[in-house]
Structure formats: structure tokens, C-alpha cells
Amino acid sequence: MPAKTFQDHLKILKTHEARLADKHMRAMYEADSDRFLKYSLCLDTLVFDYSKNRIDQDAMNALLDMAANLGVEQKRGAMFAGEKINRSERRAALHVALRGSVDKAVNVDGLLISDAVEQVLQQMRDFSDAVRSGGYQVTGGKVTDVVNIGIGGSHAGPAMACEALGKFRDGPKVHFVSNVDSADLLTTLSGLKPETTLFVIASKSFATAETMMNANFAREWVEATVAKDQIGDHFVALSSNLEATGAFGIADERCFAFWDWVGGRYSIWSAIGLSLMIAIGSRNFDAMLEGAASVDRHFCDAPLDKNIPVIMAVLGIWYRNAWGCSAHAVLPYDHRMDGFRTWLQQLDMESNGKSVDLDGSIIEYSTAPVIFGEPGTDGQHAFYQLLHQGTDFIPCDFLLASGANDDLDKHRSTLAANCFAQSEALMRGKSKEEVVSELISAGMDEKKACELAPHKVFEGNRPSNTFVYEELNPRTLGMLMALYEHKAFVQGVIWNVNSFDQWGVELGKELADKIEPVLVIGDTTAANNSSTEGLLRAYLNFRKN
Ligand code: F6P
């Protein structure tokens, strides 16, 4: 019998969807007091509750069969063994090696991965310790400010982690500049002194237009104040293109290398983490690596039905493909996790926002959903109305730390109560009978209560996962990030797409390169369609004024 394809599995999933479509989760909880125990897992100091999903054991079995049949375990083995699973770029995807999770014998084109990783990691530790202690000096003495210039994977992870781990930052101030909008760079530089500022130019390719433009400006900014022979001390590079870093004028000893088998969006664990390491110290950075490594071990060792990233992945596919959900909300009840959705957007949408399979054939099912979110409780006052009463249901992930010693107690309880309340409200809803009876008890007459009731009804039955963990610290953050990385990997395997390339970002770059000279010479007729031409004309007219 030929092996089952994703579409064969999808047909099976749809029969379960049809079976469960009219079942309300409220009734499922009423019928089974062990539902939480059945559908939750613990990993170190983290609890993952997936019981508030529209699933029963038969549906879960079908989802996990799909993961097993479509080769999740084999492909996981291939990734950890350093096989070139990124086929369109002929590269391995070995970010897991950056946290010590591959066998010491794994090599790529003859390079022993573990040795190379340890060498750069030690170089990073030495340098960040020196910057933090003042052992590394720039023109004005000790470095007071570090400016990380990078974009995409060379920005989003470190910027997010720096904010999330704000409590652990005890080094020089670390700033992040990514946007080619000069407001980003100028705002950051406005409070800084060139003599005590260190620029970390983070770019795997060292060719990304936005980063190079900002880096060139930064160099001019330093050159205006600092003596020529000291300018070099103000720059370090994080890159896999050591020729280009040399051409930019950064000495080899201040270049921190990584390799083509580290994808941009998976690169925070590599030299790209240097600015973060300077901010939080090498021991905290190591703790983050160790958190991610513990998830790698769990991902490799746990059976599929106890494997958190596998369960996250198949539930995502359940809603995306069997129920037709096109969005997924990530809702950290943690103000410092504001950047998490941005990091996750790149991870998930750049990895799996694909419409051809590994062989280049067009696929006939949906892949990555739109990821969006906002820290609670702010999100509650923005888009939760739609989550609760909109026409489509959107699966959500709630993330909550039990707290930290320096939290205000009352704030902490209110925050946590809101998090638990939201997932319960989404799940339970409120029926028309409940609404009417409440209104009448509050003194409203029955006619008015019945008129108002439809507006106050919550159909509920809206699914969510919840992560609760002890504290948002480097280790937990590393765990959370690795869980989502492996989730994306598993989904890519099941959808049969290449999660490690990103050709979809190229066309926009190509056209920007063509449009920019048009803007400079002001000849809008060079645009190749009336919309772009009209917009260019309007823009140039405004500029003239
Ligand atoms: O957005 C496209 C992309 O290639 C990302 O994958 C990458 O993280 C980012 O640009 C930055 O690339 P680089 O690190 O080479 O500057």
C-alpha cells in the first residue's frame, strides 16, 4: 500500500472535525473531570495545558498518527544529524548544535560542528566579559552603550530577549536599530556619545541593504569625533561573511563567525546573541542555551503523544487545515514579552509561509497562519472582542509566569486572574439562557433582557493552549523559544515544505533596488504600472513641497 500523504491524513482529520463540530468543550469538561490531567504536560518548571482544545482522544490519535506517518521522527533525526534538509539552499539546519544538542561527531563539509561552536561561544564570553568589566576599552574608556545594528533574525530574537530579560540586564545599555527609516537610528544615537559607544553590526550575509546603510552611517558618526586609528575599536561584526566584514574595516579579532547552517531566524543562539550576552552576561546567556537544550532533549526523546512541540504543531495543523483557521494569536501575560510575537512572526511565517513543497510542486492545502498578538491585558482592550464574538474562531496561546520577587503582588494576581479568565471565557462562553437570567436577576424586564441578550451571548468553544512557568528567566525563555522553533519544524515536515529557506523576501528587495534610482532622478515614467507611477508622482510632489 502506498504511504499516506498529508491529504490522505487531512481527509481523516476532517471526519473528526465533522464529529466534533457540534460538541461543546464545556460539555467535554463536564463529562470528564480528568480532562486537564489527560491533556497537559510538564517540562521542568513549565506546564503546558492543551485541554481547552476541540479534541478528544480519537482526534489526538489521528493527529499523532499523521505526525508519525509523515516522518516527523526521521526528519528530526536528519536535522540533528546535520543532513542538508534545507534543500533549495543545499544547507543543513543545525541551530540545535549552537546549544550543544548534536553529537560531537557531527560535521558539515568536514567542519566539526561542536568544536567550532564552542570556540566562537568562548570568544563571545571573553569579549562580553571584557566589555562588561571595562577590560575592553574604546576611545572614551569603558563602553557605556552598545548599538546592535541588524534586521530580521539578526535583530528580532536578541531585541526580544533583551526586553524580556530586562531584570537580568546589568551590563552597558544595549540598543537595537533595525529599520532603514532613519528615525530609528537617529533617535537611538541622539542620546549617545561616539567615544563610549560600541556598534555591533549583526548580519549573516553582511549585505542586507538596511543593515549596511545604518552601519555605514554609524561609521561616519563615529569618524566625525574619534581619531582614525581608534575607529576600529568601536565596531564588531557578527557574520558568516568574513570577507565582507574585512572589507567594511572590521579586524578579524573583532569578528564573531557563524555558519550557513544557521538560519537567520534561528540565529539568536549563535554569535548573533552577542549584544544580548553583553546585556545579561555570559552565565545568563548560557542558562538560555541550556533551557533550549533541555527542550531539544525533550523533543528528541519524548514519545510523540508526550512531546510538547509535536502536540503544539499538530494542534496548529488541526485548526489550520481541518477547521480552516487562518490566524493564530500569541498572548503573553507578561509586559516584557512584547517582542515575542515579532520574533515568532518571523520564525513561523518566514519558515512555513510557503506554497510549494520540497520538490517545488504547488501544494493544495493551507500552510502557516497569520501570527499576531499583544501582551495581556492590553490586548484585551484591543482585539479580544473579535476573539470572543467574531465570526471566526482564532486559536490562542496564553503564556504566563507565576511571577518574580520584585512584582507588585496585587498587580501580579490581577494579571494572572485575567489570563486564566480569558482562556476560560473563550472555552465556556455564556449561553442566551444564562444572559437572560442574569439580566432579569439584575432587575431588567424580560422583554428588554431578550432584546439585549444576543449582544451579550458568547458562543464559547474557542480553543487555546496555556503555558504556565515559574519565572520569566533566561532558562525559561530559552525553553519557550525552542518549543516554538520545533513546533515550526514539525509543521514544515507535515506540510512537506522547506522551513529553512525564505525566497519570498527577494522580489520586494529586487524591485526596491529598481525603484530607488527612479526616485533619485525623479522620472516616474520608468515605473512599470500606473499605480506605482501615480504613487511615485504623489510622493515626489510632497517631497518638493
Ligand atoms: O528577511 C529576510 C532575511 O534574509 C532573514 O531571513 C534574515 O534574518 C534577515 O533577512 C537579515 O539577514 P542578514 O542577517 O543576512 O542581514
Image: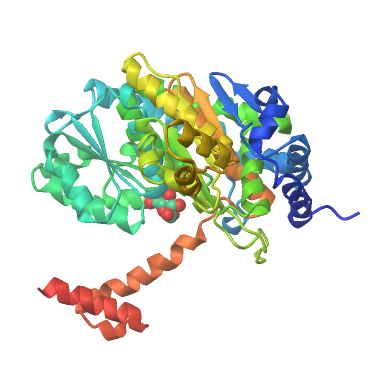
Identified at 35% across, 49% down, the residue is 151
Q: How many discs appear?
A: 0
Q: Front-most of 516 and 457?
A: 457
- Give me the residue at 61% from left, 34% from top: 52
The answer to whether residue 94 is visible is no
Way the structure is coloured: rainbow
Nearer to me, 415 or 525: 415
Residue at (30%, 49%) from the top-left corner? 178
Q: Residue at x 61, y 38 (%)?
A: 312
511 vs 187: above or below = below
Judged from this view, the residue extending furthest toward the right is 1
Q: Where does residue 339 sit, x and y in percent of width and height?
A: 37, 39
User: In the shown orientation, is residue 358 left or right of residue 276?
Assistant: right
Q: Residue furthest top?
A: 405
For this view, does 167 lie left or right of residue 228?
Answer: right
Q: Quadrant of the C terminus?
A: bottom left
Q: Position of residue 473 (x, y in %)?
A: 42, 22
Q: Position of residue 188 (x, y in %)?
A: 19, 43
Give the quarter of the figure containing the N terminus. Answer: bottom right
**Which is nearer the eye, 527 or 410?**
410
Location of residue 191 with respect to 15 vertically, above or below: above
Q: Taking the image as drawn, is residue 142 in sight?
A: yes
Relative to residue 461, is residue 251 drawn left or right? Answer: left
Locate residue 521: give its quadrant: bottom left
Q: Percent x, y for residue 233?
A: 21, 37
